[in-house]
Image (tube, rainbow, N blue to C red):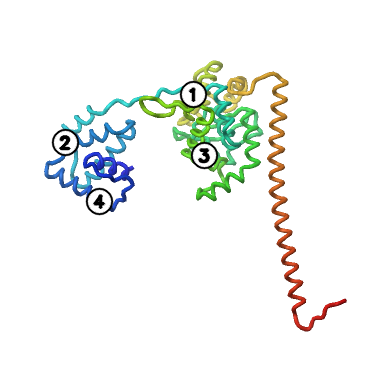
Amino acid sequence: MYLSAWVKFLSLLYGARLKGASPVILDPWVAKYVNDLRNGRRDLAADLQVLGESCRTRKTCLGYQSAIRALLAGEDLALSPGGQRHLRRARAPHPLTRNESLTPGRILKIMEHLDTRGRAILYILISSGARLGEVLSIGLEDLDLDSRPARFRIRIGKSGGSRVAFISREAAGAIRVYLIVRDRFVASALSRGGTGDGGLLFPLGTRAFEQIWALALSKARLERFDQVTNRRTITPRATREFFAVRMRAALPEPVVGELMGHAGHLPESYRRYAEEELAGAYLRVEGAVTLHRSHPKERVERKIADLERLVGLLQEKIGERDEELTHLGKSLLKERESDHLKERARPGITRQP
């Protein structure tokens, strides 16, 4: 953040091409700016205003301005009270992105372009109402697929407390399919220099999933950008809105709030509903967050397709094991032939007829 802020700041003020510059290259430019401030050739409040106007979002603006002011504070350079008030007034209001809502049809289109892991994550998001970071931090020991409804524990939520989130049967089925090939994703993460944390259900970062999401949106022809903020109008956060809208049509607002973790900061004794009460309420309206609600014949056909996909994955895994055994057999055969040749070449040993 500090490096990006100073690169942008100095590039704007002096017209220098500093993108990708190292701290060693930036140091003389920073010293020049400090000298200009001391000699009255620059106005810090006006310069920070220019920096703020060049940022796309208010959060980036405040972060960059804070980075500039923090470094200058070490040089005993700070905004005057008048400059502080001027800068506060000059900040432009934060433009909001006009987000689009998710529908079951849109979700199914996105799922067509996701792999086994991506589909499992999306099923969890839409059926639990959990945040993306909470889903990606699920530990294997926190998952309980045998309960009814299936559930997982969020150890540290956004509010700092822990809670239990529930998932639908189709989400639990998607997780079971993913667990068959999970080792492959862990190995892939390790090969790319990632942690490949064996304790996590999904060894994946938030930014990596957002890239997967963007690619799936593009392939599904659902990728659209807001004209003002130039941000995508459909984000993973829309899954949380999808859950809230559908649950509020069938459950009281306080129940939906606790299912989504709005009371996660409260101790257990202060929460309005017990875990089993929430589980019972979730079971009654599980169909609201279930995507595949169709004719019995279609459900059977879909189940057969899922089983065929599962059989295919198992056959692929068996094929990989067969290749490993074949390779191991060839290696053992080569070692045996090598030992036989060494025995023949050893002096004093005659070949038996």
Choose top left, top right, bottom left or bottom right for residue 52.
top left
Choose top left, top right, bottom left or bottom right for residue 150.
top right
**Is residue 312 at least partly visible in the picture?**
yes
Q: Nearer the viewer, residue 293 or 142?
A: 293
How far is mark 4 from mark 2, CA to CA?
Answer: 25 Å
| Residue that numbered label 4 is attached to | 27
How far is mark 1 from mark 3, CA to CA?
Answer: 20 Å
* Relative to 174, residue 338 above or below: below
Dot 1 falls on a residue whose secondary structure is helix
How far is mark 1 from mark 2, CA to CA?
Answer: 44 Å
Callout 4 amino acid: Asp
| Residue that numbered label 1 is attached to | 241
Where the N terminus falls, by quadrant?
A: top left
Which x, y percent locates residue 227?
38, 24
* Mark 1 / mark 4, whichever is N-terminal: 4
Callout 3 amino acid: Ser
| Residue that numbered label 3 is attached to | 137
* Mark 2 / mark 3, whichever is N-terminal: 2
| Residue that numbered label 2 is attached to | 80
* Relative to 309, residue 279 above or below: above
* Relative to 338, residue 179 above or below: above
